Image: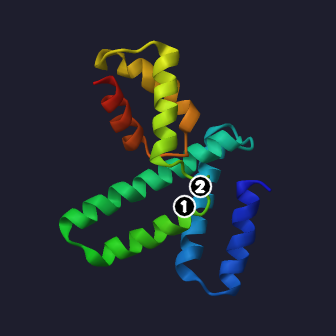
Amino acid sequence: MSLLGRLNDEMKQAMKNKEKEKLTVIRMLKAALQNESIKAGGRDLTDEEELTVLSREVKQRKDSLHEFEKAGREDLVAKIQTELTYVNEYMPEQLSEEEVSAIVEETIAETGASAKADMGKVMAALMPKVKGKVDGSLVNRLVQQKLS
């Protein structure tokens, strides 16, 4: 089942169960996916494009969460954490740090990188492999550690 179909089914269920927060998040995700579809010329999105939209939504919420925590806005922190929980339900299973580390080492070997100057080359080869399955900041940190 496509992501949009799954969102429609879960939206109906959230309406029946009167889950207001979940319903709001599902509607927001559907809107983001539909906007991306319109940008793509009205065609259906590929799985990879859907994943890109979901990743963007997760990143936006994590950024907001960080800013609200810095500002001491606990009311908004709780709201964003709830939204993040719902959005993460639609993301693929995340890789562990050990799995990511192994992929980083493999990619460094493939690209022949040996210094921090090669970081861009490694990241360009690595990110398509782990897209949506891991936070980019973790990948960045691991690549920097391995190239040091």
Quarter of the picture holding the N terminus: bottom right
Q: Residue at the location (58% across, 60% down)?
A: 29
* Nearer the observer, 100 or 90: 100
* Nearer the observer, 21 or 87: 87
* Nearer the observer, 136 or 39: 136
Q: Residues within 10 Å of mark 1 (few under 14, many from 20)?
A: some
* x and y percentages locating residue 108 in the rendered image: 45, 21
Q: Residue at the location (52% across, 77% down)?
A: 21
Distance from Cα at disc 2 to Cα at disc 1: 5 Å
Does 67 sit above or below residue 96?
below
Query: Element type at marker 1?
Result: helix
Q: Residue at the location (52% across, 42% down)?
A: 99
Q: Is residue 38 visible?
A: no
* Nearer the observer, 48 or 110: 110
Q: Is residue 9 visible?
A: yes
Q: Are marks 2 and 1 in contact (CB under 8 Å)?
A: yes
Does 148 sit above or below residue 69?
above
* x and y percentages locating residue 139 in the rendered image: 41, 38
Task: Using the image, tell me which numbered label, if any, was put on residue 61.
Answer: none
Residue 82 lies left or right of residue 15; in this view the side is left
Does 47 sit above or below residue 76?
above
Q: Which image quadrant is residue 90 in? A: bottom right
Q: What amino acid does circle 1 point to? A: Asn
Q: Which residue is mark 2?
A: 91
Quarter of the picture holding the C terminus: top left
* x and y percentages locating residue 131 in the rendered image: 55, 39
Q: What amino acid does circle 2 point to? A: Met
Residue 34 lies left or right of residue 135; in this view the side is right
Q: Which residue is mark 1?
A: 88
